[in-house]
Amino acid sequence: MRKLILCIALIFSAASLSLAQENYDEALAKKLGADEYGMKKYVIAFLYRGDRVSEYSEAERAEIQNGHMANINKLAEEGKLVLAGPFFGNEELRGLFFFSVGSIDEAKALTESDPAVKAGVLKMELKEWYATAALGMVVEISEKIARKNF
């Protein structure tokens, strides 16, 4: 029975490898920084409500938010931010950034440049994450389906 299970597993493994090789696009994998599994390391920033939110008027917070959005767009254009978005509701966890950078230190420097972080309206916690390199195409695809810019 063990030999039969092993044989079936090897057949499925070979079929999976064959399918992966058949669909493999070396140029795209290289462009996206994919490893042999089509994956890569990212750094996720968990954005939390900062300690200084109440120090600002509504108009000041709106100005800080505009700077925050401009920073998001700049980082996306540079290819350093592949995905970002807020959570619904008004909880402490406000949103996520997915950075395509080489290290947590680089992501830390990018988060510290954000106007909302500088103002203390947001604070961030960083974690390394391993996922499909295809996330690098999110910005390109998003530009094709959005009618309005932020």
Image (cartoon, rainbow, N blue to C red):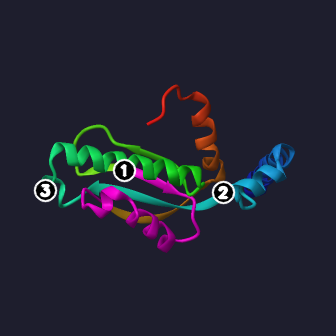
Type of residue at label 1?
A: Gly
Type of residue at label 2?
A: Met
Q: Describe the element under mark 1 as helix, strand or loop.
A: helix
The span shown in magenta is 95-122
Which dot marks residue 55? 3
Image check: 87 left or right of 121?
right
Residue to which mark 1 is pinned: 67
Q: How many marks?
A: 3
Q: Describe the element under mark 3 as helix, strand or loop.
A: helix
Compared to residue 36, the image places residue 149 above or below, namely above
Compared to residue 122, the image places residue 109 above or below, namely below
Residue at 54% from the left image edge and 71% from the top image edge = 103
- Viewer-proximal residue among 94 and 22: 94
Q: Nearer the viewer, mark 3 or mark 2?
A: 3
- Viewer-proximal residue among 39 and 71: 71
Which dot marks residue 39? 2
Residue 23 in percent (x, y) is at: 82, 43
Residue at 46% from the left image edge and 64% from the top image edge = 110
Q: Disc 1 vs disc 2: Cβ atoms closer than 8 Å? A: no
Considering every residue shown, the one lying at the far top of the view is 147
Residue at 36% from the left image edge and 64% from the top image edge = 125
Q: Describe the element under mark 2 as helix, strand or loop.
A: strand
Q: Disc 3 vs disc 1: Cβ atoms closer than 8 Å? A: no
Type of residue at label 3?
A: Glu
Q: Nearer the viewer, mark 1 or mark 2?
A: 1
- Classify 10 Å Cα crowding around label 3: few (below 14), some (14-19), many (20 and above): few
Residue 133 in percent (x, y) is at: 65, 53
